[in-house]
């Protein structure tokens, strides 16, 4: 391999894993997220999901709400992500940069901006209403939990001498959200159930035991003065709720859109949903998919299955993934050796900061455990948070689904924060950091499908906007595979490295799996990305190639004339990503017998002309090509340390001077920041082999966020363990999960075993 930096091992035997043999009896506490009462805020609710369908369970007593999501529900239609005026604007910006007029270049670069992404939507609400007697539940009898071992949410409470139980799970094999409600005594269960939505919709009964909800997403993102005539047909959707009750119970229809149950022992409710989305290149108006028919057919296929059958199939599917890895941060960890092979289901830690606590006080809510962590540093809570991240990835990203977005699949708003859109300057990539080291490689498949779609639109953007070959993606995208720059200022919009960063995941997948067929399949994506990078690089001073224009994501600098600017040339992150991609395609070409291709020759030539990573006057890594004044030294992004992580070009063994500068860069940046920034810094400290600082960042993340005063926080955890920017962003849940593995491996390039057949 190039520079001998990649350590590759042979593909393990197919029978390396036996998930059903997992012995979890010695874990320090049950893997459960627990609550002392019903949710008061959305971030108190329990998330369940099967990759495509998601629900947030509030756990109310007199009323229960399951807020629903389906991952293809977005505003808009396929777009044109090209700008024929961009080449002239690009030429203007480059001249201004060459002249050192960075502030004017920053202003002119707005001409390269495009329209914003579309917006992730919600499906609706599944509502249960019980009679007033439930408000007189027995004090202290209430419990609510999410069991990570079974991906099952439960609510229990007593009214008099009757205990009521609700169980909820989202089945991937049967594509259904299942709810079972029961009373401990016969005939005690009565309730009303309905479906509703904030989107344009219609709900009605279908026979005596079903409700059908039909609705549509806006054909354009919400705009203040858009007339109805300007809005094209958007994505259509449907949900069907099916009711089954015990013998002796009675069900009837209310108001043609609700179902009322009386005197039943138990009830099972099945929720299926689908949409007219037929891929990123098909207009909703041209889609031939009928969401109602698809939903009814999905329901028909499982109607013969009992609740026990559905639950067993759900457990088999989920635990096949979840039980591949366990983490035990205690002195009692057992040997990881079996038959002379490394068994990656236990990870030891000798970190002195972690004190093993054998207490199993189930009465303590998870929120209280978050609060107490700063003093008790309970290692079992770190285990829980690690496994919660794995649970969320399994629940939000499965083969055939959309990529896990800024909030996974869970969203309650018509206009969510940052549109819930995948952001490619750290957030989407971090969502998939745990997929390989945490042995969930199948969960990464939607990312590869998405990269393929982006390459199609991105080739048009590259050709028209930049007169370049290959394909390009910028900072923000959506379900329609948007590849053009975002709207607005260059500081966030003008960043054409999104596709290149995504391509590093392709090579990383190969280094874990040693799947040569996979590498052969994705090699054209690497080729296209590399072709764009070669064309994007232009001759600069000193014989180096440069990127111009260039930004460091979302970060301004003070130009030599004292004016604020964001556009210059050859930001450290640009060059670090390009260096990584070049190294990877050279290695891939060697493996695939493509080393004599003309493109590979160009890469070899360009690689020697990339500017080196520089150290600033104060001893930190320079963020831009010149040592500009930084007006915000505590900025949330640490983009200029990409070469350290997730890149591989800055290492303690080979570049000690750069590691020393990276160490100071992190100290200078400080510990505060959004959740994703905190977890990125933890990973960076781990790459520097500094476990003390890495653990400090983990500890920094574990702080309880008050959702009524979010503005007072940076990072932290909500009571349901969602991570905060704030508001909620799921990326730090995944980043933290990955870091728990990386802290025990200098370079997380060990090869976990394949999934069972």
Image (cartoon, rainbow, N blue to C red):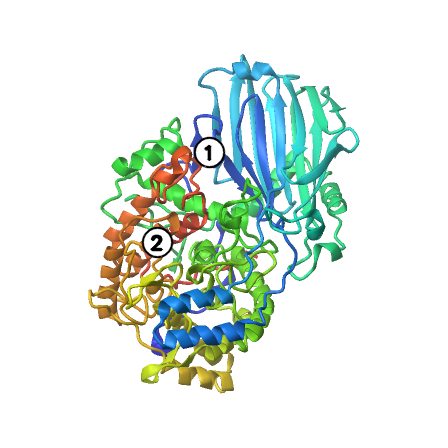
Q: Residue furthest right?
A: 207
Dot in front, 2 or 1: 2
Residue 295 in view here: yes
Q: CA distance from mark 2 to mark 1?
A: 26 Å
Q: Secondary structure at mark 1?
A: helix
Quarter-wise, where is residue 459 in the image?
A: bottom right
645 on left or right of 55: left
Q: Residue at x 52, y 66 (%)?
A: 473
> In the picture, which quadrant includes the N terminus?
bottom left
Task: Count every numbered label the image shows and give the total.
Answer: 2
**Label 2: few (<14), some or many (≥20) within 10 Å?**
many
Q: Secondary structure at mark 2?
A: loop
How far across and how far down the image is residue 298, in percent? 72, 45
> In the picture, which quadrant includes the C terminus?
bottom right
How far across and how far down the image is residue 523, in percent? 53, 74
Camera-nearest residue between 474 and 687: 474
Q: Residue at x 32, y 31 (%)?
A: 359
414 on left or right of 621: right
745 on left or right of 504: left
How far across and how far down the image is residue 249, in percent? 71, 20
Camera-nearest residue between 448 and 603: 603
Quarter-wise, where is residue 77 in the image?
A: bottom right
> Image height check: is 543 above or below 374?
below
Residue for badge 2: 636
Q: Do the residues under discs 2 and 1 have CB atoms within 8 angstroms? A: no
Whichever of callouts 2 and 1 sits on the residue coming sooner in the sequence is 1
Camera-nearest residue between 155 and 70: 70
How far across and how far down the image is residue 739, in percent? 36, 53
Q: Which mark is residue 44?
A: 1
Residue 597 in view here: no
> Image height check: is 464 above or below 731?
below
> Image height check: is 492 above or below 390?
below
């Amino acid at each position: 391999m190039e520079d001998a930096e990649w350590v590759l091992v042979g593909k393990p035997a197919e029978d390396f894993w036996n998930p059903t043999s997992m012995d979890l009896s010695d874990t320090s506490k049950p893997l459960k997220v627990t609550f002392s009462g019903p949710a008061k805020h959305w971030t108190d609710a329990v998330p369940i999901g099967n990759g495509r369908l998601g629900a947030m369970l509030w756990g109310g007593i007199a009323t229960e709400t399951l807020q629903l999501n389906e991952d293809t529900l977005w505003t808009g239609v396929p777009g044109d992500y090209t700008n024929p005026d961009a080449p002239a604007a690009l030429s203007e910006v480059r001249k201004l940069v060459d002249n050192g007029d960075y502030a004017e270049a920053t202003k002119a670069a707005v001409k390269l901006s495009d329209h914003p992404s579309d917006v992730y939507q919600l499906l609706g609400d599944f509502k249960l209403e019980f009679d007033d007697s439930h408000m007189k539940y027995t004090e202290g009898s209430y419990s609510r939990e999410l069991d990570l071992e079974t991906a099952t949410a439960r609510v229990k409470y007593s009214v008099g001498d009757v205990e009521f139980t609700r169980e909820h799970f989202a089945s991937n094999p049967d594509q259904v959200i299942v709810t079972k409600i029961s009373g401990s005594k016969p005939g005690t269960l009565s309730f009303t159930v309905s479906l509703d939505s904030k989107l344009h919709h219609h709900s009605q009964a279908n026979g005596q035991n079903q409700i059908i909800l039909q609705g549509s997403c806006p054909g354009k993102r919400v705009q203040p003065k858009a007339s109805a005539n300007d809005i094209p047909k958007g994505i259509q959707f449907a949900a069907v709720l099916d009711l089954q009750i015990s013998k002796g119970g009675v069900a009837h229809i209310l108001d043609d859109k609700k179902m009322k149950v009386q005197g039943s022992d138990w009830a099972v409710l099945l929720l299926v949903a689908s949409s007219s989305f037929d891929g990123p290149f098909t207009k909703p108006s041209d889609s031939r998919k009928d969401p109602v028919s698809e939903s009814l057919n999905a329901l028909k296929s499982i109607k013969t299955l009992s609740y026990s059958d559905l639950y067993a199939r759900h457990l088999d599917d989920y635990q096949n993934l979840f039980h591949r890895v366990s983490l035990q941060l205690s002195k009692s960890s057992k040997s990881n050796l079996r038959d002379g092979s490394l068994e990656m289901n236990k990870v030891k830690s000798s970190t002195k900061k972690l004190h093993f606590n054998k207490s199993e006080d189930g009465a303590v809510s998870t929120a209280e455990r978050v609060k107490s962590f700063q003093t008790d540093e309970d290692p079992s809570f770190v285990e829980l948070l690690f496994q919660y991240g794995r649970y969320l990835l399994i629940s939000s990203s499965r083969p055939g689904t959309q990529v896990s977005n800024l909030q996974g699949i869970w969203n309650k708003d018509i206009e969510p924060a940052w549109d819930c859109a995948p952001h490619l300057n750290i957030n989407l990539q971090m969502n998939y950091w745990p997929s390989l080291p945490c042995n969930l490689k199948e969960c990464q498949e939607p990312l590869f499908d998405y990269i393929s779609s982006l390459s199609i639109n991105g080739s048009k953007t590259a050709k028209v906007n930049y007169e370049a070959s290959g394909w390009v993606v910028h900072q923000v995208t959506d379900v329609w595979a948007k590849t053009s720059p975002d709207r607005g200022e260059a500081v966030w919009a003008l960043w054409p490295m999104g596709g290149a960063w995504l391509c590093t995941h392709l090579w990383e997948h190969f280094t874990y799996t040693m799947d040569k067929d996979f590498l052969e399949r994705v090699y054209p994506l690497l080729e296209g990305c590399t072709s764009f990078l070669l064309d994007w690089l232009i001759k600069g001073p000193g014989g180096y190639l440069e990127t111009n224009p260039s930004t460091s994501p979302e970060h301004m600098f003070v130009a030599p004339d004292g004016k604020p600017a964001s556009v210059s040339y050859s930001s450290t992150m640009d060059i670090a990503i390009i260096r990584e991609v070049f190294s990877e395609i050279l290695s891939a070409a060697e493996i695939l017998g493509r080393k004599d291709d003309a493109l590979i020759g160009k890469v070899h030539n360009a690689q020697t002309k990339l500017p080196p990573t520089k150290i600033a006057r104060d001893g930190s890594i320079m963020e831009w090509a010149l040592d500009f004044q930084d007006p915000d030294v505590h900025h949330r992004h640490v983009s200029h340390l990409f070469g350290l992580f997730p890149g591989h070009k800055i290492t303690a063994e080979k570049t000690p001077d750069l590691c020393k500068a990276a160490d100071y860069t992190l100290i200078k940046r400080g510990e505060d920041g959004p959740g994703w920034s905190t977890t990125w810094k933890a990973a960076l400290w781990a790459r520097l082999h500094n476990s003390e600082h890495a653990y400090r960042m983990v500890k920094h993340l574990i702080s309880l966020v008050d959702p009524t005063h979010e503005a007072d926080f940076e990072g932290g955890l909500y009571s349901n363990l969602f991570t905060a920017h704030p508001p909620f962003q799921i990326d730090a849940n995944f980043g933290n999960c990955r870091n728990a593995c990386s802290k025990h491996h200098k370079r997380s390039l060990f090869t976990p075993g394949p999934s069972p057949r």
